[in-house]
Amino acid sequence: MLLNVETVSKTYPGGRPVLDQVSLTLEHGETLALTGESGSGKSTLLNLVGALDHFDSGEITVEGTSLSGLNERGRAALRRESLALVFQQFNLIPSLSVEQNLSFHARLSGRSDTAWLSHLTDRLGLAPFLSRFPEQLSGGQQQRVAIGRALATRPALLLADEPTGNLDETASAAVLDLMLELVAETGCGLLLVTHSAGIAARLDRRAHLSGGHLA
Amino acid sequence: MRRAAIACLWSHWSRHPLQLVTLLAGLALATGLWSAVQAINSEARTSYAEASAQLGVGQFDELRAASGSIPLARYVALRRAGWQLAAVLEGQLRLPGGSVDVMGVDLLSYPALPAVEETSQDDGIAPTDALLAPGLLIAGPETAQRLEAQPRLPPVSRTQNLPSGVVLTDIGTAEMLLNRRSEITRLLILPDQSAGLAPLADLAPDLMLVRAEGRSELARLTDSFHLNLTAFGLLSFAVGLFIVHGMVGLSFEQRRGMIRTLRALGLPLRDLTWLMLGELLLFALIGGLIGLVLGYGVAAALLPDVAATLRGLYGAPVDGDLALQPAWVALGLMMAVAGTFAASAQALWRLSRVPILQAQGQYAWTAQGLPALAQAGFGVLLICAGFLALVIFDDLIAGFVMLGGLLMGAALLLPPVLSLALRLGGRFARGPLEEWIWADMRAQLPGLSLALMALLLALAANIGVGTMVSSFRLTFTGWLDQRLASELYVTARDEAQGHEIERWLNTRADAVLPIRWTEVQVADQTVFLYGIIDHPTYRDNWPLIAEVPEVWDVVAEARGVLINEQMARRMDLWPGDSVELLPGWTLPVAGVYSDYGNPTGQAITALPALLERVPDLPNTRFGIRIDPAEAEDMRTALADTFALPPQAVVPQAAIKASSLAIFEKTFVVTGALNILTLGVAGFAILTSLLTLWAHRLPQLAPVWALGVRRDTLARLEILRSVALAVMTAVLALPLGLVLAWALLAIINVEAFGWRLPMHLFPLQWLVLLLLAVATAVLAALVPANRLRYLPPSDLLQVFANAR
Amino acid sequence: MRVRLLIFLIFLPLSAYAQGFAGLGSDADGFAVPERGHVLEFPRDHGAHPTYRIEWWYVTATLTGADGRDYGIQWTLFRSALAPYDKEGWQSPQLWLAHAALTTPERHFVAERLARGGIGQAGVTVEPFEAWIDDWRMAGPDFDSLDLRARGAEFAYDLSLAAQGPLVLHGDRGYSVKSQDGQASYYYSQPNFAVTGTLTLPSGPVEVTGNAWLDREWSSQPLSEDQTGWDWFSLGFDDGTRLMAFRLRGGRGDFTSGTWIEADDSATPLPDGLIDVQPLTVTRVAGRDLPTRWQLALPDRALSVVIEALNPQSWMATSFPYWEGPVRVTGSHTGKGYLEMTGYD
């Protein structure tokens, strides 16, 4: 099993529970869409799975590794080596060039593979922009860099939070297509947060969050 | 509407109190250090002026004796020859807690003294009290208190008109106090002399005439000290203004949206500009006032050391107490206001050009500076212009223009040079994190460049001034070693005793070197011409900076003359030139020797040749060569045998020790100012880092999300700050050395007529480098620590979906 | 009558002398006081009397140049004691002050010298006689034959004085009363020196001849509290007679005194009330009004003369300023003399 989320709860200080006893699983190579209203806790769940935030109770395991048992060092290593992230805001590193951004995560995790990277670059159509800086790219191009950066590490699990939320319709469709194709090519699992039913329908499975519960 | 606009503008500051505090602190630091230096300088100058006015110093020509003491009978004889003179007996009176200078004047003939007049009006001095035993002492309040604490001293009268540490009294009282009966230190030549008097040169050839204008050299000498302080003050001011510039720019940038909205709502640009100007004025006044308080504190803390330095180094009487002068307050506030507006000019100019409709650029305020290449070009241009000015005009002002061009140009060059260095450094990066660090530093550079410029200037100033002061000390002590080669210096009471002492010493000392000189006129300037005997003491030790071959043989055989550097530079005489020393006696210049601190020209020739032409040279002073271990015994023996007063036999070690003690004081002052300027630069770095904080998170969060720990990121923050500081320090080193060179070889020569050789002090640089690193670490510690303990939720905010 | 030392003390650069010496006129604490009947002895009394508060050697001369013009010179040495003793060194209480002046019909040159006693810068010795301060001196083998020298920034003089008669003792054998209250001084004169010598003016040297009058006076309590100033005349008439006369102006009316000297040098004291002086013409001098033309009458001697200043601007701009200059005499008697006026502030 790639991912196992078991009765996980999360409450932000002074608020009502965001996640209440949520459980779900994901197999290797499987894609899962996480849908729900604004504030339903879907981004929070994604952050918890990404070892970016702490949960109050329950357990999450990634490739058999229990997150609750990890210290900061272990969590950072997990993010570096098993996971990859794509955000709505792209969140590229502004001071690095496109080329450096693309290879950054893979080199950080010590899994740099030149052939794979150049293949990804070609597939994402980024070859002409390698020496540019993120702020010189359009939103769609930036998100392609983010996807390339994530997949370059050949992660076990790709976490994507509204990856097309900041893009117009045309760019959105193109980016999504490319991402799904490359995920399939990479053979990694995908947990994708979206509010769009259309996008959710293109994934293997769909889980709907409402008021902190999985429907 | 205006009130609403004011409330709106003000809301920015209440939401960003740290910005406000930083802005005010920058202003306060700038004003404070500058004002402190001004206060110290003006206090010292006031003291000189006071002393000049109150003690009649520097107003009249004077007669002095080579031995330091004129017998009373000589005074009476000159009086009876018709010369109107005023006798002064000066000396030091030992008191617990440091000696005081006693100035005993013939109250009846001395020109009017404000101190005496004031005291007379307040206390009603009766001539009986002032002129007859036990006498009356007049002193400033602090000194008066110390005198009154002593038993068996004459009564004390207080005055505001005397510098601290000076006791004014009648010469009759001074004789008793100093135990120097029938001695006179100097004779003032009063104005309104009778017509047809016999010339003093005939009546008293043994007394030297010291012209009033000659002694105003005191001011020129002390000026070199004030020059250092002023340089420090101006640099501190500039460094502080960098902070102000950054903060005002930031606040204007952050209020762009607000400004646009206000204008859209119908507030005229002109009103808005006035409001902003008013706001700046208010800040300038508040920051300036805080700065004045700060400056007063700094000055009050440093002044005693400065006073001690000046007193010791040049005998300039400076009060250790600081008086608050209204002009100083006004000037300080004016500088604060002018500085604020100068630092804000760019921001204000931009404000006037903010269009009502325009998207807000995130980094606009930093990105809108000059393009890197243009900035570098401008910097190079400034430096070249400075040097060009020096080449063309070659005077003191040009020297300062060059310094200004050099410093400004270098500051402008810093960001492009750093950027280039970072780009090159990035080439050698291994691993993604290293690559990112280099790239990130370059990305940070625009926001940090002002702070780094401030650091550059502070470091360069420290290296420059430190090198100058240290070079001066090293050179001066080395020069003392050379010039004061004899172990003992003795001054006989008169010619007869001089011969006696010489005879006595011939069997007891290794060598007796007569110190005999006469005053000659060379090119309308007074030059002191010394005759020396041929002795290894001179051959081995005399500090020559230019010479002909076999220079000492040439001098010994009277085929050439040695002149001091001042005379050489002033009259442009160098080996190969000739100089007419006496009518009909012209000698080629055989060498030039350094003679620091001496305002007058000096020349050295062979004694026999000089005696041939000036047979009646007084012979009362001698240098004694002797085993240093026996110097003290010899001194006692001399003093006992010839009943010489203590000041007539001076051991060389005592002179050196007192000179060194003075320099230690100078170092305390320089050191304190070093720390303060570096502190200001450190503060600039801190505020810049804090300002950049808001922009930092979006850059750091993705790296963190990709698996780099927060503590690693925090360490890297500090590393970056240190790396930038170290690079800046490395660049500051050549700049500082050029600055030191300019101070020593250009400013000093133009201002004082002698050139100091430059010595390098790598250990000082190391200390400075460590200080710069410490400054950078301290400045980065706050943001780094904040990053390290940042809750993940704050970092996650960066990724939060725009809703 | 020359008791200016009082004012000298007030006007010293040490301006607060005034307070220390307020009430001097009535208080001679510790100082010797002149006594009637004391016999003056010469040459001893030509010298200084340190136990008295004030003393002077005062010479005025009316001169005629080889160029035919009239001149006048003044040479005065004052001694002022802070305490009634003498001692070597700076702390001697004996202070010395001197004034020298040279008057021409157009110009009036003044110089002043100050000195401390006890160090040899100024003093008086008796045998041979010398009175000096700095390079100014009056000296000779004895009191009858003196050389007189002084110089300032713009003038100098070098004169030989030869006494033509005996000393004249004023008042009661030299005891001269100065007020209705009985304040007195010792006072004698040599009223008739023949003078030859050289004056040096900015325009060059002038040979001169003429007559000099020397006054010696010392005391400790010269003035009454109400006395504000005086007018003093020393006149030599063409018939060989001479007159010394003074008027002390006081709150209780004037006090006059003087001495009439016959051509045969016999002297008669003129007690209070015999002499009548009246100002005739007032001149603006140094910012104040001073009478520079006088009517003087001595009915006893059928004398009624008009006295007129040679140079009305003979102002002594010294530490304590006063008017002193040569005068011409016309009327019942003709002649020359000197006039001194103080207290016209």
Image (cartoon, rainbow, N blue to C red):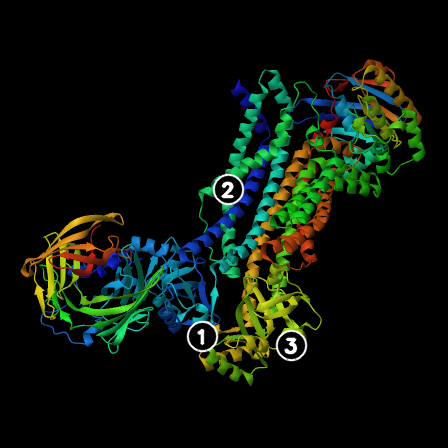
- Quick check: do tags 2 and 3 share a chain? yes
Look at mark 1 in the image and give the residue it sits on. Answer: B645
Which mark is drawn over residue B292? 2
Could you tell me residue B580's position as x and y percent?
59, 67
Whole-Å distance between the Cαs marked 2 and 3? 63 Å
Look at mark 3 in the image and give the residue it sits on. Answer: B557
Could you tell me residue C163's position as x and y percent?
20, 72
Which residue is at a point 58% across and 56% down the rendered structure image?
B752
**With respect to residue C334, does A117 lie above or below?**
above
Could you tell me residue C275's position as x and y percent?
9, 58
Q: Secondary structure at mark 3?
A: loop
- Quick check: do tags 2 and 1 share a chain? yes
Which residue is at a point 55% across and 25% down the rendered structure image?
B274
B166 and C293: which is toward the camera: C293
Q: Is residue B515 left or right of residue A48?
A: left
- Quick check: do tags 1 and 3 share a chain? yes
B713 and B538: which is toward the camera: B538
Whole-Å distance between the Cαs marked 1 and 3? 37 Å
Which mark is drawn over residue B795? none
**Of callouts 2 and 1, the N-terminal one:** 2
The quarter in which the C terminus of chain B is drawn is top right
**Residue type pointed to by label 3:** Glu
Q: Secondary structure at mark 2?
A: helix
Q: Is residue B147 left or right of residue B354?
A: left
